């Protein structure tokens, strides 16, 4: 019985072993096919990437060429087209950029080291009044002053402001409002006087700057505006032998207040009966005290708790063949007492 079963078991064992070998060969063949397929896909992907990279490199080269062409055209146009000349304007705006400012050198109007030259009288443009006013340059006065009437201090948005009236030519008046800075006490021949100080924007020649002015009635004075050394210092020098060096600003619609005309007297000579015209005698004039109406409460803060304008040393476009000359300010030779002429 056992002898008959042994051949059957041997056949069964051989069949199982052959089946395992066949399965192993089939699995290896499928793995090799999958690997071949992956390698083929990788080759195709690399080929596509190389193609796109070559296209991008071609486009980059074309763009660089176009950029060079544009730069060449710009250079050619820059040589052919000259920009229109514009009058130079110097504006002292802030303390941060004041060190980079440069007043253009103008023959006869600036010194070699860049300071303006002011004559005995100068035209200034006051932005708040939109008017040109003839001013007298006075290095003996510390603070500048401007003619004002009906002065009233009032409150606006928690700050002090000042409104006043400025007389101009033709018997007309200009109503002006400006920020209040402080009160200043001035010693006059007829006693002490407290004047309000306001801050206004003025234009003198090529300079545009904010300046402080005391308000007083200058209707009986020769000039409606007096420029003191606080404005002149570090910005200009004074040549009293000249007048109106910087000229008048041309602003459309601006009013004007010029120097008051001096009246002359006609005198008859008793000997020959001829009429002679004599110049008016120089009389000492006193500035009128202007009443100030203050409508604000003591707790109201002044508008100009703003920092006091700081004057910086200015630069100039000095020609290469001109040796810089150090010019001292005329204001340094005067006393510090407040004066008003």
Image (cartoon, rainbow, N blue to C red):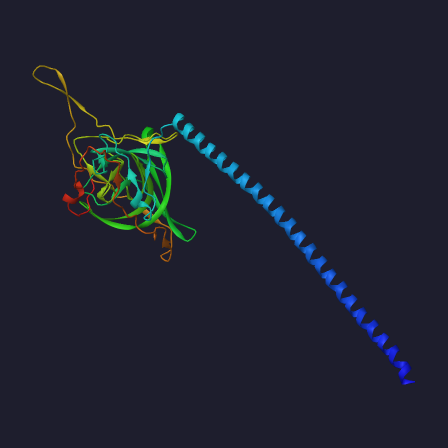
Residue 178, located in which quarter of the rendered image? top left
Q: Quadrant of the C terminus?
A: top left
Q: Quadrant of the N terminus?
A: bottom right
Residue 58, located in which quarter of the rendered image? top right
- Residue 150 image point, x, y percent: 34, 42
- Left or right of 151? Residue 29 is right
Viewer-side residue, 186 vs 85: 85
> What residue appears at the point 39 percent right and 52 percent down from the top-left corner?
159
- Left or right of 132? Residue 50 is right
Viewer-side residue, 16 vs 308: 16
Residue 277 in view: yes
- Left or right of 244? Residue 81 is right
- The vertical placement of 42 against 249, above or below, is below
Numbered label tally: 0
Q: Residue furthest left?
A: 271
Q: Residue furthest right?
A: 1
Residue 210, located in which quarter of the rendered image? top left
Q: Residue furthest bottom?
A: 1
> What residue appears at the point 67 percent right and 52 percent down from the top-left corner?
41
- Residue 315 image point, x, y percent: 26, 40
> What residue appears at the point 16 percent right and 28 percent down from the top-left corner?
280
- The vertical placement of 161 against 118, above or below, is below
Viewer-side residue, 144 vs 83: 83
Residue 211 in view: no
Viewer-side residue, 252 vs 109: 109
- The vertical placement of 326 against 182, above or below, is above
- Residue 93 image point, x, y percent: 34, 44
- Residue 160 image point, x, y percent: 37, 50
């Amino acid at each position: 019985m056992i002898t008959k079963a042994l051949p059957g078991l041997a056949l069964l064992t051989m069949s199982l072993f052959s089946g395992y070998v066949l399965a192993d060969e089939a699995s290896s063949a499928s793995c090799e096919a999958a690997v071949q397929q992956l390698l083929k896909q990788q080759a195709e992907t690399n080929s596509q990437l190389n193609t796109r990279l070559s296209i991008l490199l071609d486009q980059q080269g074309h763009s660089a060429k176009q950029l060079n062409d544009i730069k060449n055209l710009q250079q050619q146009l820059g040589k052919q087209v000259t920009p229109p000349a514009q009058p130079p304007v110097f504006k002292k705006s802030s303390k941060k950029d004041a060190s980079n400012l440069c007043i253009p050198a103008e023959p006869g109007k600036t010194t070699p080291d860049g300071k303006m030259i002011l004559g005995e009288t100068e035209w200034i443009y006051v932005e708040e009044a939109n008017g040109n006013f003839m001013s007298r340059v006075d290095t003996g006065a510390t603070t500048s002053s401007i003619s004002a009437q009906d002065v009233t201090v009032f409150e606006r948005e928690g700050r002090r402001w000042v409104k006043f009236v400025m007389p101009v030519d033709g018997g007309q008046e200009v109503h002006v409002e400006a920020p209040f800075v402080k009160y200043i006490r001035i010693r006059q021949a007829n006693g002490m006087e407290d004047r309000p100080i306001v801050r206004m924007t003025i234009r003198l020649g090529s300079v545009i700057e904010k300046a402080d002015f005391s308000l007083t009635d200058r209707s009986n004075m020769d000039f409606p505006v007096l420029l003191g050394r606080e404005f002149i210092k570090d910005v200009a020098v004074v040549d009293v032998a000249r007048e109106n060096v910087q000229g008048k600003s041309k602003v459309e619609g601006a009013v004007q207040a010029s120097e008051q005309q001096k009246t002359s007297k006609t005198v008859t000579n008793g000997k020959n009966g001829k009429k002679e015209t004599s110049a008016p005698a120089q009389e000492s004039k006193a500035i009128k005290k202007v009443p100030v109406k203050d409508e604000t409460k003591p707790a109201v803060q002044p508008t100009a708790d703003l920092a006091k304008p700081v004057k910086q040393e200015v630069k100039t476009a000095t020609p290469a063949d001109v040796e810089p000359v150090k010019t001292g300010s005329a204001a340094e030779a005067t006393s510090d007492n407040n004066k008003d002429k």
